[in-house]
Amino acid sequence: MLCRSKGLFLMPIMVALLLVGSFGGGCTTNTPATSGKPTTSTSGSPSGAKQSTGELKIATGNLGKEMLDPTLDAGSADKQIRTLMFDYLVGAGVDGQLSKEYGLAMDWKAQHSATNSVYTFDLRQGVKFHDGTEVTAQDVKFSLEYFARKESATVYAAPLRDAIDRIEVPSQYQVVVYTKKPYAFLLTDLSSLGFVEGIVLPKAYIEKNGTDYFNKSPIGTGPYKFKEQKRGTSITFEAIAYQHWLQQPKYKTVTFMLVPEESTRIAMLKTKEADVVDAVSRSNLASVQSAGYTAFSKKASMIININLGQTWDQSSYLNDARVREALNLAIDRQAMLDQIFKKAGSITGDDYYGSWAYGYKPMPLYDHDTDKAKTLLEQAIKDKGWSKVELTFYSFDRPGVPELPLIAEAMAGMWQKAFGDIISVKIVPVDFAVVRQSAIDKKVQNSLFFVAIANRLFWTSTQRSVFRTGGLYILANPPQLEGLIDKAAAETDMDKAGQFQAETARFIRDNHFVVPLFALDDVQAANPQKVTQWDMGKFVYDPNYRDITVRGRAYPAK
């Protein structure tokens, strides 16, 4: 039986099947980049540089929890709006490669032994926080400890605590990080190829004013500083008045406006109330392009899966591998890709893994086999003495994927058709943040919920955060899986590390701990008079807004 909670207002799947349009030509992909060497920070206006003028207005469907302190929320929407204000310790280019030109560490060295790893970072001198104080090694040490503290809500806070043994500061501009075990992924974790844990924060400012004040009046080292926040409405950043160490702001102000409805965002683009809009759905893309606006896409940037909550709970229906496999076999992924996503993407068998992964090996795709699916579910119900399987499907959209509620409707309908009265799926619309907290609190028994996870080079830290005891929240934690994750995390040879993370993904796939669905493009649209080129790069949960808000190119590949 397919159930919906009272008050649910979702477009039925039959409407989704009638949607028209295509993801045809017209999307702008990466543009050849020009390069420039990083400059040294100075206190005055940049000599000979153009002044920052005008405003760029970005209409976004999600501002997350609107936390400006990056340790207070793990939401992907929060990361992308913070990128103008903060810099990372370790730099990376748009090609997904680490770069010593683009981070606050101008050099680094990694030494691996049989017992641990030692990372030495040498900092740029003269880099300023927005209050005029200089960045030193003490700020880096403080930042890592601040992100790893118990109160931190970031995705990799737990893995960071698990990895780092101690941090030493030999000199004003040098930091040495010692890990508890051999660990090869720290450089990636502390770059924009990771999440937010590599952002460098002001030690003295936070210690003097406190976390609450910093969350309301943050400062960083980026080319834009915080100006104003209207909660539930907008966040505005203002160009710094001095020479940034790397980039020169193009606009006087950049404003992120919260506009949840896609139709409203597109209307604002057409009326010039917005210069850029995010999360353009596949069904609306053609009309946006035909109106003269440019679409920019980040290829295969988002992996869409369904999390199966608490499979480790022996009292749960989802603890039975036959139930998990049956759910995977009963859905027609091709129909959903064709009809809802307009063929804009690809079907994947990858679970917490993706095509950008180092040493990538695609996971096997699931067949659409309703007969086998029903047999598996009937066997599980008979053996366990259940009358039927009862599940809750939490439905919400995510940045870049407004179609997710339609997918929930489609999948629940497919399960009802395949299994009849031996399954009940209740669709509950809810905010992602609520579901995430429930997962952290271990309150998602017999529950399904979406994960739209950014493609990336290394997946081990992400796998550790949800498939290992002590992670952010635990979907499954059999000893063999934890052992594979630890093996990958301890490997210092990158080729072997890539092989091990593929083996981990295969174990997750073969045990059906997740329902893998699609690899999709992130699509944004812009007024061509304001945005002529945009390389969205391979940064995690970050469309590289710096590339359209600074002069020249933000992080060109070398």
Image (tube, helix red, strand yellow):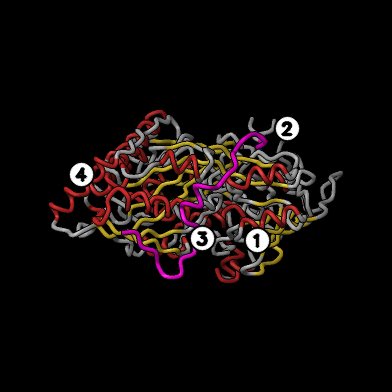
* Res 147 visible: no
Residue toward you, 278 or 505 = 278
User: What residue appears at the point 64 percent right and 61 percent down from the top-left corner?
Assistant: 259
Q: Which marked residue is nearer to the observer: mark 1 or mark 4?
A: 4
User: What residue appears at the point 37 percent right and 60 percent down from the top-left corner?
Assistant: 439
Span shown in magenta = 1-28
Q: Is residue 551 left or right of residue 302?
A: right
Q: Assign the magenta stretch its main secondary structure.
A: loop
Cα gap from disc 3 to disc 1, whole angstroms: 14 Å
Question: What residue would you read off at disc 3?
Answer: 71
Q: Earlier in the sequence, mark 3 or mark 2?
A: 2
Mark 4 element type: helix
Question: What residue would you read off at disc 2?
Answer: 34
Mark 1 and mark 2 in contact (Cβ < 8 Å)? Answer: no
As displayed, is residue 98 above or below residue 378?
above
Question: What residue would you read off at disc 4?
Answer: 375
Mark 1 element type: loop
The amino acid sitting under disc 3 is: Thr
Q: Residues within 10 Å of mark 3 (few under 14, many from 20)?
A: many
Quadrant of the frame with the C terminus: top right
Q: Earlier in the sequence, mark 3 or mark 1?
A: 3
The residue positioned farthest toward the right in the image shown: 48
Q: Earlier in the sequence, mark 4 or mark 2?
A: 2
Cα gap from disc 3 to disc 4, whole angstroms: 47 Å
